[in-house]
Image (cartoon, helix red, strand yellow):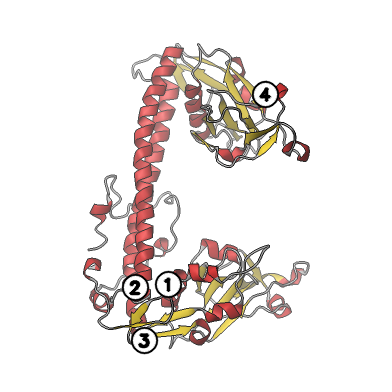
Amino acid sequence: MINNLKPYPAMKNSGVPWLGEVPEHWEVRRLKQTFCRIIGGSTPSSTEPAFWDGDLVWVTPADISKNSRLKDSLRRITHDGLRSCSSELVPQGSLIVTSRAPVGNVAIAETDLCTNQGCKALVASPTFVNPVFGFHVLTTLKGELQSLATGTTFTEISTSRIGTVSFPLPPLPEQAAIVKFLDYYDRKIRRYIRAKQKLIKLLEEEKQAIIHRAVTRGLDPNVRLKPSGVEWLGDVPEHWEVVALRHRYSQCLGKMLDAKRITGRHPLPYLRNTDVQWDRINIDDLPEMDIPSNEYDRYTVQKGDLLVCEGGDVGRCAIWSSELAVCGFQKALHRLRPRNRGRDVPRFLYYSLYAAAKSSAFNDGHLSTIAHLTGDKLKAHRFPFPPVTEQESVVDFLDNASRQVDQTVSTAKNEINLLREYRTRLIADVVTGKLDVREAAAKLPEEPEEPELLEEIEGTPEGEEELEGAELDVTLEEASIAD
């Protein structure tokens, strides 16, 4: 159906460079001529308790970054709080636009609400602008809104500048047809995105299971087992050693960063916690600190060293492959180095750390993740150590298995990005009058709204029922969104 869409039969110049031609019967108005009012927000005094924790939804840019439909807010204010400041209550159906960095995020008010000074509320007349149509147009206008923002400390777009932005306006019945068409295909696209997200989650769980089994049982299904004495390990092969990490690897925390060490005569790039992801180390735009040559042994990394996050995602690690000639590391990272490189393979320990972290082995009492994994705690953790030849075999097996899973996950993520780009392009073409969807919309079935599809998430919620098209071999071609 989408492939059969045609342009409108008669077009005219809109007079707006970014908009180009629009259907001959459409109007092009400025926002201040399209909406009843454009209202700024405000914040009650934070020192007055009587102004807060009331029953009025009070929206900030943080609320809009998480939701495109606003029914609630992270913080609420009281009626006294509203009266104390210049914010106003705006009606359901108003469009809320972030006017401070980030500029141009849009949401629909699904209840009466007020905003802080980081937002503008565009109050629509229901006999003139369909709120959902307005939402789609303003989302398409994000780049235009951002281009009008000014400021040095932070960028902001004023009420007067927002009012000058041009807005394509078809007749109200045609707006409703456009909304019906876009909602139908938006739901369809979101279903396929959810299916891809479910696939990614299943693949990541499969990868975790493969790694856990290989580093705790090895590759021989008939091997004799013994209790390891470590909860997350369970039983391990009888001939494996299970010992504290200190016996097989040396451990060292990186250099403490302070103002004096940021500059100096011996600047070296250094790695931070955020630079170390699972099996990947970022070396782009690294900061520098002063590390003299007599501290290289202690505070720089060598090929084959494991770097383990001390805080944040505790236990996350990667192996240094000498991407830079000399590189330091900050105190937020542990450096692990085998005491005998002929006895231990660092990549086997990498997989063991991965399995331990995914099994919550670094959790404190299995209730909450340790805020910081100290050197003493890390060295005391017990890990399995098979003979070196077996470590090498397990690593070869897991490298191959991980590569296959990672490639499939990467393909699925790329397909999600393509679907999102396709949806963005489709919405822009329709709401700016490049495609005529009136006839197509009239043929579409009525569908109930699916609230769970309104907001996409990076992972699919546990316990969610299987969605149509969620088989592991779903492809873009099979999705047939254009049908």
Instruction: Measure the alpha-carbon separation of dots 1 and 4.
Output: 56 Å
The mark lying in front, picked from 4 and 2, is 4
* Secondary-structure class at tag 1: helix
Distance from label 1 to label 2 (Cα)?
A: 9 Å
In this view, the mark in front (1 or 4): 4
Q: Is residue 364 above or below residue 156?
A: above
Q: Measuring 51% from the left and 21% from the top, which residue is drawn there? A: 346
Cα separation, mark 3 vs mark 2, equals: 14 Å
- Give the percent coordinates (x, y) of residue 255: 70, 31
Question: Which one is nearer the viewer's eye here, 446 or 234?
Answer: 446
Q: Is residue 194 visible?
A: no
Q: Residue 174, relative to residue 336: is it above or below?
A: below
Residue 378 vertical placement versus 371 (above, below)? above
Front-most of 152 and 320? 152
Residue 296 — which label? 4
Distance, label 4 to label 2, CA atoms, is 60 Å
Amino acid type, callout 4? Tyr
Number of the front mark, 1 or 2:
2
Question: Of callouts 4 and 2, which one flags the residue occurring earlier in the amino acid sequence?
Answer: 4
Give the residue pinned by disc 1. Answer: 136
Distance Cα–Cα, label 4 vs label 3: 71 Å
Secondary-structure class at tag 2: helix
Q: Quadrant of residue 90?
A: bottom right
Residue linked to disc 3: 171
Q: Residues within 10 Å of mark 4 (few under 14, many from 20)?
A: some
Q: Which residue is mark 2?
A: 430
Q: Amino acid at mark 1?
A: His
Work out whether mark 1 precedes mark 2 in sequence or the reverse, and give the earlier one.
Answer: 1
* Cα distance between the residues tagged 3 and 1: 16 Å
- The reply, left or right, for residue 68 in relation to residue 119 is left
Q: Amino acid at mark 2?
A: Val
Q: Residue at x 27, y 79 (%)?
A: 8
